[in-house]
Amino acid sequence: MKNNSWLYGEDVSPPDIPQEIVEARLELLKTHLAKLLDHSYHIRDNVRVAGVLKAIDFWQSINTKEV
């Protein structure tokens, strides 16, 4: 992920996303992941599983500060 100064410019600090929004999205993603994983490895949509895992990682780190 690109850091904030790379994306927004030097000396700019974009506002954090409210934690309740982050938690709501994570809850939805984790619920969906559980449904996807409830199928046999051979018949589930593993590309979708990987996408959901990537989204979970993104939302878990959304408000972390990178220098």
Image (spheres, rainbow, N blue to C red):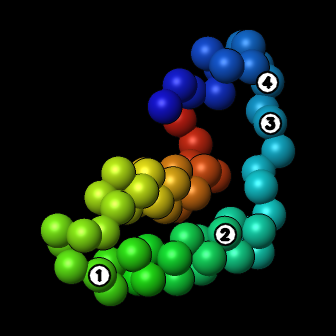
Q: Earlier in the sequence, mark 2 or mark 4?
A: 4
Q: Earlier in the sequence, mark 3 or mark 1?
A: 3
- Residue tagged by mark 3? 14
- Residue tagged by mark 1? 39
- Please tell me which residue is depicted at 53% across the width and 35% down the height of the picture: 66
| Position in image of residue 38 (x %, y %) | 32, 86
The one nearer the camera, 3 or 10, is 3
Q: Around disc 4, counting alpha carbons within 10 Å, would you say few (fewer than 14), some (14 to 19), or many (20 or more)?
A: few
At mark 1, the secondary structure is loop
Is 9 positioned to the left or the right of 3 in the image?
right
The one nearer the camera, 64 or 58, is 58
Query: Considering only vertical position in the picture, is 1 above or below 62?
Result: above
CA separation in Å, label 2 and label 3: 20 Å
CA separation in Å, label 1 and label 2: 22 Å
| Position in image of residue 8 (x %, y %) | 75, 20
In the picture as drawn, the residue positioned furthest to the left comes out as 42
- Residue tagged by mark 2? 25
Q: Which of marks 2 and 3 is nearer the N terminus?
A: 3
At mark 4, the secondary structure is loop
Dot 4 amino acid type: Val
Disc 3 + disc 4, Cβ < 8 Å: yes
Is 12 positioned to the left or the right of 7 in the image?
right
Which of discs 2 and 3 lies nearer the camera? The answer is: 2
